[in-house]
Image (cartoon, rainbow, N blue to C red):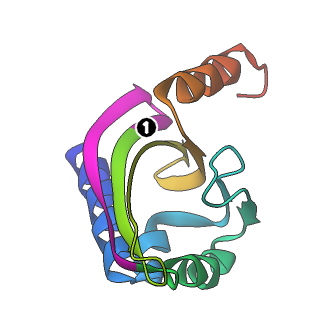
């Protein structure tokens, strides 16, 4: 994995924490897919990077002091990177603090992100990686 790819991933998480969503998607293809259908926070699929900022901003409105910390970046293949992150936030209305670990699987097409999938466990992410490897279309 190139240092530039690692730096871009870390910069994307930092921009997300600041609410600078257009910067997050700078390295994404226009038709990129954001698939968090396996994660309780979002339960959704967004297609096209232009749809991401508005949806992300809406999600962030419910939280105070929300952020995420990258714990590990692992190259799965030349076209896939698995990121382990910890998200921490406090609900604006409830005041309840929530901490959770997530795994984000980045699929690249060339030097840009084509898809990001979110998972609640490393096992789920590894199952998706295995399915991708077994698929003739991967």
Residue 42: where, in percent of width, then height? 65, 61
Name the one closer to the observer, 41 or 36. 41
For mark 1, give the secondary structure. Answer: strand
Q: Mark 1 — residue? A: 81
Relative to 136, is 31 above or below? below
Q: Residue at x 53, y 54 (%)?
A: 113
Query: For the magenta stretch, what is the residue range?
Result: 64-82
- Is 130 situated left or right of 12 in this image? right
Asked whether 70 or 40 is in front, the reply is: 40
Q: Magenta stretch: dominant SS?
A: strand
Q: Nearer the viewer, residue 103 or 101?
A: 101
Left or right of 126 on screen, residue 73: left
Position of 19 relative to 114 (above/below): below
- Which quarter of the rendering shows the N terminus? top left
Q: Is residue 6 above or below residue 34?
A: above
**Residue 6: % across, % down:** 27, 48
Residue occupying the point 60% across, 83% down:
58
Mark 1 neighbour class, 10 Å CA radius: few under 14, some 14 to 19, many 20 or more: many
Residue 75 on the magenta span: yes
């Amino acid at each position: 994995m190139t240092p530039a790819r690692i730096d871009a991933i870390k910069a994307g998480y930092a921009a997300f924490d600041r609410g600078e969503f257009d910067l997050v998607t700078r390295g994404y293809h226009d038709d990129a897919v954001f698939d968090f259908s396996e994660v309780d926070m979002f339960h959704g699929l967004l297609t096209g990077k232009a749809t991401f900022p508005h949806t992300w901003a809406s999600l962030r409105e419910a939280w105070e002091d929300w952020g995420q910390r990258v714990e590990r970046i692992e190259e799965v293949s030349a076209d896939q990177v698995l990121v382990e992150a910890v998200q921490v936030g406090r609900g604006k209305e409830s005041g309840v603090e929530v901490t959770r670990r997530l795994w984000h699987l980045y699929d690249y097409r060339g030097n840009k992100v084509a898809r990001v999938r979110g998972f609640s466990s490393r096992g789920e992410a590894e199952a998706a990686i295995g399915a991708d490897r077994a698929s003739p279309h991967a």
